[in-house]
Image: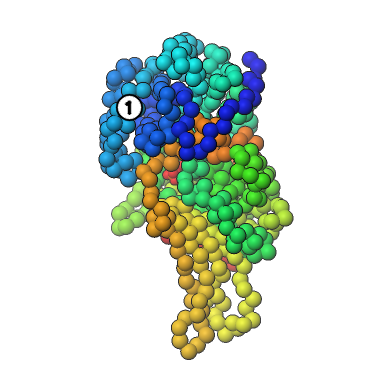
Amino acid sequence: MSAPHDLEHEAIAHGQRAPACTMVIFGAAGDLTKRLLIPALYNLARTGLLPEHFALIGMDRLEMSDAAFRAHLDAALRAFAADKHYAQALDETHWNELLQRITYLQGDFGEAQAYERLRDKLAAGELAQRSADNVLFYLAVAARFFGGIVDHLGAAGLVTEAPGRWRRVVVEKPFGHDVQSARALNAQLRRHLAEPQIYRMDHFLGKETVQNIMLMRFANSIFEPLWNRDHIDHVQITVAETVGVENRAGFYEGTGALRDMVPNHVFQLLALTAMEPPASFAPDAVRSEKTKVLTAVHRVDAACDSVRGQYVVGERDGHLLRGYREEVGVSAISMAETYVAMQLGVDNWRWSGVPFYLRTGKAMSKRSSEIVIQFKRPPLSLFRDTATKALTPNALVLKLQPDEGAALMFGAKIPGPSLSIGQVHMDFHYKDYFQNAPSTGYETLIYDCMIGDATLFQRSDSVIAGWEIVQPILDYWAQDAQAPLATYATGSEGPAQADALLQASGRVWKRLA
Ligand code: BG6
């Protein structure tokens, strides 16, 4: 089947109601749908951003009536309603209006007839009669189904665009398992879809604090002049979690921390931190700059520049916690890493010689995602008599979650007759300035798909560039005998070997806070 033409669709400004469309969720009976997609759609309805003419078709293998599907979603949303991420009190009017627009279609994703039934349902829908034939297909399914579903959508003619009618597909992560499979998946999708029709989801980009990295850098004039190799000593990017593998051993055993977190979430943070200012905030202007950063990362020497770790029994807050190999569904000889740290260099004029240290892990002491921009030390001659360790260099810490904000660390005179320096923090907390609207983090992303703004979605070249960086590490680790798996106690800050990555150059990780 030939690829559809890239069609221009009328641009909708942010903040306006999205245009009429139908959303089809594959995997409608799954966890993502009830936990994030439906609450996000409800929040969009509540804030007046959901299209005036909107329908949702949930599709899954289970036999279920429309009423049973609605009851299932209703129970889930009510259970979440007390949670701060959703809404304090359910707005019954908006929720009931949304529920009335939801229907269910039973179908096996691998069967052509299911897509014929879907086509009939879309054609018979109220929306089609109003000739608002736009459809957003959301693949909230396991990654092995992505390619097959799009093949079927293509064969059934469901993703063919026409003037005034868009068809878009949202693909959740993981996008591929390595460079080769990511390329193959891209090729499979591109047989039926033009690149602008594909929205590759990375939910980190839905986080306000992640979007703020670009704003912080480019909407202020004080940071950018310092944001380069002349002033920055190194950068640390941390995504630390306290949760272990939970009930996801089936997925995690074959995935591990590197694939699960790095080519997607952590590299998005790297790209936003290191990118050049885009010529505009147009989706491709931003995405091109991000891709350039990833393609400028020089080849990682896996043996020297990466550390993998797995959590073993430990304790947090006085509670004894089991190790990864004791988790339900995990092999007693599992080599899956639950922690990864690495050192990277970005070979361009701005960053040459500045190390970027990245780490992410599960079952750690604190949940904390931060980016630390560590500046160079001042010349020491004036402070010859001050212990060097008291002269802590300046750092800007972008706090992504859970404590959202930023902190600037600098030295100040300790009051008293002697000239001694102490380190102080200037802290900004989001909650002190902005009211936090209940949000799952998916609202902006779903809304952006509806209005056709792909800025916060991964373009194919950037996904491939991410996999290319980690591929040498994956290959090296595949030889278990040569690549040691470090251990770290649950509730700790990670394996000692990760500290050694920085120690070699006299640097240390910022403590998890
Ligand atoms: C997901 C990973 O993509 O991101 C999970 O598969 C991880 O393993 C999660 O826990 C972290 O996301 P958040 O939004 O909770 O920081």
Is 237 left, or right, of 233 in this rendering?
left
Image point 37% across, 19% down: which residue?
Answer: 104
Is 94 left, or right, of 381 in this rendering?
left
Q: Quadrant of the C terminus?
A: bottom left
Image point 52% across, 85% down: which residue?
Answer: 419
Q: Secondary structure at mark 1?
A: helix
Where is residue 46 drawn, in percent x and y?
A: 36, 36
Picture layout, residue 50 above or below residue 213:
above
- Answer with the quarter of the image where residue 39 lies: top left
Where is residue 467 drawn, in percent x and y?
A: 61, 39
Image point 50% across, 88% down: which residue?
Answer: 418
From the viewer's side, name the closer residue of 479 and 452. Answer: 452
- Answer with the quarter of the image where residue 405 lies: bottom left
Q: Quadrant of the N terminus?
A: top right
Q: Which residue is mark 1?
A: 97
Neighbor class of circle 1 (other Cα within 10 Å; few <14, some 14-19, many 20+) is few
From the viewer's side, name the closer residue of 437 and 184. Answer: 437
From the viewer's side, name the closer residue of 138 and 313. Answer: 138
- Answer with the quarter of the image where residue 188 lies: top right
Number of numbered labels in the structure image = 1
Q: Quadrant of ligand 1?
A: top left
Where is residue 233 drawn, in percent x and y?
A: 62, 63
Specify the amino acid type for callout 1. Answer: Glu
